Image (cartoon, helix red, strand yellow):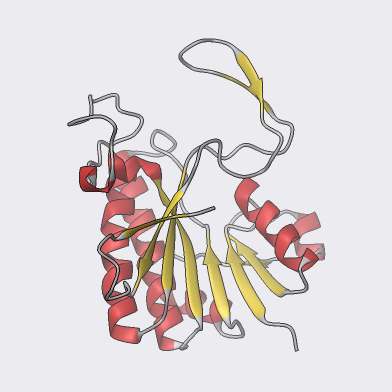
Amino acid sequence: MAQRICVTGASGQAGRAVVTGLRAHGYDVTATDVAVTRADREDGMLRADLTDYGQAVEALSQADAVVHLANIPAPGLSTPAVTFNTNITMNFNVFQAAAALKLNRVVWASSETTLGLPFDVPPRYAPADEDHYPVPTSTYALSKVASETIAGHIAEWSGIPFIALRFSNIWARSTTRSSPRSGRTRTRASGTCGATSTSVTWPRPAASPSRLQRTP
């Protein structure tokens, strides 16, 4: 039987790419989001508000693992308080539900902004490395820093591997964007991040001197 994976935030750019990729590799995917179109419903996507713990538990109840991508994805889209409170509530609910249901693995979207990017406030030093963490300069970044702390503790309590992916900008396949600094247009050929991502894994291997593991 194929492993069943719940993907939250499945109607977003990253979510759609992840759902497509997992299904192409033979996984049984349960897709969920709070923003669900008629076409999404016809495709089997579940509408769930993950700020409600009961709905988070129900969304994950049949899953073996979760790829948690649902969050307000950037600063400036909502008020600072709404951004922080919404993200931290969703993340805690999904992490706690995964632990209560004894899922095999949690993979979730953190952000490179935990290191201080985009460096509107100059970095402490350059090049920035893991010792530069945490440097949140917005409530969005703060929600990711706080969520990494929560994820680390729940992983230690439950023994479930938690992997936080610190993504950069996520652009859809063949989407053209203008650089905010140069005004030049660029086209990305993938639906993933626009820069090298890093990941943090919990529980951390005892033999590893570093908390940071770079993804291929």
- Asked whether, in this view, residue 164 is left or right of residue 67, the answer is left
The residue positioned 28% from the left and 53% from the top of the image is: 145
Residue 21 sits in which quadrant? bottom right
- Asked whether, in this view, residue 134 is left or right of residue 187, the answer is left
The residue positioned 36% from the left and 85% from the top of the image is: 159
Q: Position of residue 97 (x, y in %)?
A: 43, 80
Residue 176 vs 97, above or below: the answer is: above
Residue at the outermost left position? 124
Task: Count the labels in the image.
Answer: 0
Q: Position of residue 114 (x, y in %)?
A: 31, 45
Q: Position of residue 94 (x, y in %)?
A: 44, 71
Residue at the outermost top position? 183
Residue 89 vs 96, above or below: the answer is: above
- Foreground residue, 168 or 32? 168
Which quarter of the rendering shows the N terminus? Answer: bottom right
The residue positioned 43% from the left and 39% from the top of the image is: 74
Residue 16 vs 76, above or below: the answer is: below
The residue positioned 74% from the left and 32% from the top of the image is: 174
Residue 78 vs 148, above or below: the answer is: above
- Foreground residue, 75 or 157? 157
Q: Position of residue 214 (x, y in %)?
A: 44, 53
- Foreground residue, 143 or 38? 143
- Foreground residue, 45 or 30? 30
